[in-house]
Image: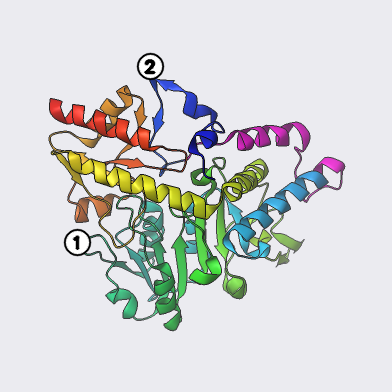
């Protein structure tokens, strides 16, 4: 039985007061709060395990190595992958950048991204554009669903297609399995950004069929500074090095380097070991609740939020229009800058995001806005919090 009140007891920060008001945390698309198990788990690591793994044979190093390997295994099982396909990085941004360096692009190759992307899935490709790589952008329709024509007729010499699974602005959930099939029919590689979707739904990377997938631990209850890049093992042998140094080699001579196999090939130097350990605990927590339970509960929250926002007269909503969408409400109030909306909500203890959300081309070119306010939900939020949020917005609206 999903009991949100019992779940909330696991998150110490949710009991905090802001400006004398009980915290309502609606900035989950930016980062999620951490359950006590993750917080105490990281403390346990430093007090009982702390050592540099792999390099040494002493007791602590062996325990750290076991913990690191176990975290990799948990991540792999969580997305239906093999451990050797899981590369630990800092975040989804680093994972996507890694792909931009690892894939052997050549002048004249084409990359297809989309208007729905976070800057982290735009800027690495624009850098390559300066090196003679063609970069195309899949467009969106009036409901912010991707137009499929570009995937059905990919540009000549398409090397890579990359797309977000879920937009962090419109909440659009893309049919990445369909896109993946179209991409592979053309012999191109496929990268999916899972940063917004993986905290909220069950992901089967084999079913999606991606060659690469990136996501961040901190958006799924884990610590900051740890992320994952999935690399399908069938393409391991075509990739270039990214960073070079310790642990990503088998043998080094001054005139010859023999590199390690994946995933270590992309884990040069000392990694964020405690971050991986904490991410493993976060995955344990998500599994304990159940991703299907989380998705079903959030569906109720989402429907309630989008129904109640209709009660406001001066609010324009920019999300929830797609065929399938997540629990992200992007909106503006007539006569107020989104930063003002966020400031006024914060006075009432309600935390939201405002601005471009690192998706400036989409917001400026497609929404025709100078930023939006954004409320994003997670499974520890409640119907009562949404009702309070709506009532505060009504009061703000009355004063405009």
Quarter in which the C terminus is drawn:
top left
Q: Is residue 50 magenta?
A: yes
Residue with the mark numbered 1:
142
Q: Nearer the viewer, residue 303 or 119?
A: 303
312 relative to 189 in the view: left or right: left
Tell me the residue that label 2 is attached to. Answer: 20
Mark 1 or 2, nearer chain start? 2
Between circles 1 and 2, the one closer to the viewer is 2
Report, in whole angstroms, how far the alpha carbon at label 1 lies from the one at label 2: 42 Å
In the image, 251 versus 323, the foreground residue is: 323
Q: Tell me: residue 79, above or below residue 382.
A: below
| Residue under the image location 42 percent in, 41 percent down | 28
For mark 2, give the secondary structure.
loop
Q: Range of the magenta residues?
A: 32-61
Residue 174: tell me if it is visible: yes
Q: In x, y percent, where is residue 220? A: 52, 46
Left of 45 or right of it: where is 353?
left
5 in the magenta segment: no
Is residue 174 shown above or below 313?
below
The image shows residue 37 at horizontal and vertical percentages of 63, 36
Which one is nearer the viewer's eye here, 338 or 358? 338
| Residue neighbourhood size for the residue with mark 2, other residues' Cα within 10 Å, grouped as few (<14), some (14–19), many (≥20) | few
Q: Nearer the viewer, residue 133 or 114?
A: 114
Secondary structure category for the residue under label 1: loop
Task: Give the image's coloring scheme.
Answer: rainbow
Q: Residue furthest front?
A: 1
Vertical order, 154 against 375 (above or below): below
Q: Residue at x 43, y 21 (%)?
A: 17
């Amino acid at each position: 039985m999903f009991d949100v009140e019992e779940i909330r007891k696991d998150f110490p920060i949710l009991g905090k007061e802001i400006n004398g008001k009980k915290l309502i945390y609606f900035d989950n698309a930016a980062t999620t709060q951490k359950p006590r198990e993750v917080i105490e788990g990281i403390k346990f690591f430093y007090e009982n395990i702390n050592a540099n793994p792999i390099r040494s044979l002493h007791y602590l190093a062996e325990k750290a190595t076991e913990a690191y390997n176990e975290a990799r295994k948990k991540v792999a099982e969580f997305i239906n992958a093999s451990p050797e396909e899981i590369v630990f990085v800092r975040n989804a941004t680093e994972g996507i950048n890694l792909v931009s360096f690892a894939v052997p692009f050549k002048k004249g190759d084409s990359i297809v991204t989309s208007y729905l992307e976070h800057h982290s899935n735009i800027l690495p490709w624009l850098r390559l554009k300066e090196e003679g790589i063609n970069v195309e952008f899949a467009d969106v329709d009036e409901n912010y669903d991707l137009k499929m024509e570009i995937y059905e007729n990919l540009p000549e010499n398409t090397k890579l297609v990359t797309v977000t699974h879920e937009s962090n602005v419109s909440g659009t959930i893309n049919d990445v399995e369909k896109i993946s099939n179209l991409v592979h029919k053309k012999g191109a590689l496929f990268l999916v950004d899972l940063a917004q979707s993986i905290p909220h739904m069950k992901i089967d990377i084999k079913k999606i069929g991606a060659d690469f997938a990136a996501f961040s631990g901190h958006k799924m209850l884990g610590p900051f500074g740890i992320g994952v890049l999935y690399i399908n093992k069938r393409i391991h042998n075509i990739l270039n090095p990214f960073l070079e140094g310790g642990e990503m080699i088998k043998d080094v001579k001054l005139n010859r380097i023999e590199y390690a196999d994946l995933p270590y090939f992309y884990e040069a130097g000392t990694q964020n070991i405690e971050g991986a350990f904490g991410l493993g605990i976060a995955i344990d927590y998500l599994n304990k609740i159940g991703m299907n339970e989380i998705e079903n509960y959030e569906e109720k929250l989402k429907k309630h939020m989008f129904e109640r926002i209709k009660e406001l007269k001066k609010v324009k909503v920019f999300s929830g229009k797609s065929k399938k969408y997540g629990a992200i409400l992007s909106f503006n109030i007539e006569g107020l800058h989104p930063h003002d909306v966020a400031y006024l909500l914060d006075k009432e203890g309600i935390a939201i995001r405002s601005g471009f959300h690192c998706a400036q081309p989409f917001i400026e070119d497609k929404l025709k806005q100078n930023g939006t306010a954004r409320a994003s939900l997670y499974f520890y939020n409640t119907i009562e919090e949404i009702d309070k949020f709506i009532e505060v917005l009504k009061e703000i609206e009355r004063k405009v």
